[in-house]
Amino acid sequence: NIQGRHFNEEGEKGCYLVEFKGKAIQKVEFKSLSPIVYKRVEVDCSGLEDLDSFSSTIEKVVDLLREEYPDRGLFILPTLKGNTELYSAFQDVHQLVELFETINTEYLLSNPFVQFERPTNKTLPNIDLNERKKADDFFADLLKEFDQLADDPEMAQKLIIEVDTEIKRGNRKYVRGLAEGFLKKRELQEIVRDAGTLAVNAVMMNKKRSNDH
């Protein structure tokens, strides 16, 4: 089609101008016709320590997309990744949505326009997992347990189903569906290993708060 309508039709859209000589194709040239581009992007937040540095990272993302799609309006669907000190802030969904609403406000009068859609947060705490695993303590043992779980998909799926029984009835069908259908082996391993990182981070944060008091 000549104009993408949603993020499943991302990138430039248009048509091909085909030149013939007799029945032989002489030249095929793509002609971009879409004034608006939908684009999924991954935003690397690795090492970011504050919102100012995050804003700079977002500006770079926009600049790169504008170079790739000059004179095009941009709908951007961001996925935040990487180990960052901003992990805790990004975990607050309302705060994260408000942050991108502020960013959208800053680009409100830009021409061509830029609009960020609701972000997906896949950042992790700023923990060096390999170093933590070398230690002889509870946190290292916990991470190793999660590694073993990630390498045993049957056990991991069993755990997810057990968790399902602990959730209120309204969410059971959704979680069971994840365990039975959506989760492929690699996705399951990623989720379990991420869960290990989050668990270690939660315990460490709890311990820090207790020591502060």
Image: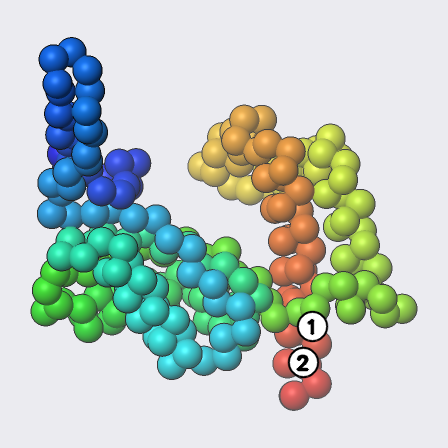
Q: Is residue 207 shown left or right of residue 51?
A: right
Q: Is residue 164 shown left or right of residue 24?
A: right
Q: Which residue shows up at 22% across the image and 42% down it? A: 12
**Mark 1 residue type:** Met
Q: Which residue shows up at 69% across the image and 55% down it? A: 196
**Mark 2 residue type:** Lys
State the mark number for residue 24.
Answer: none
Residue 54 image point, x, y percent: 40, 74
Q: Is residue 29 shown left or right of residue 203?
A: left
Quarter of the picture holding the N terminus: top left
Q: Secondary structure at mark 2?
A: helix
Q: Quadrant of residue 105?
A: bottom left
Instruction: For label 2, count other residues whose C-alpha is less than 10 Å away and answer few (under 14), some (14-19) or many (20+).
Output: few
Instruction: For label 1, count other residues whose C-alpha is less than 10 Å away and answer few (under 14), some (14-19) or many (20+).
Output: few
Residue 20 versus residue 105: which sits nearer the camera? 20
Indicate whether 10 appears above or below 142.
above
Residue 8 image point, x, y percent: 30, 36
Q: Is residue 139 shown left or right of residue 59?
A: right
Q: Which residue shows up at 32% across the image and 52% down it? A: 77
Q: Quadrant of residue 163?
A: top right
Q: How many marks?
A: 2
Q: Is residue 162 visible?
A: no
State the mark number for residue 208.
Answer: 2
State the mark number for residue 204.
Answer: 1
Determine whether label 2 and label 1 are within 8 Å by CB.
yes
Q: Which residue shows up at 85% across the image and 69% down it? A: 135
Quarter of the picture holding the C terminus: bottom right
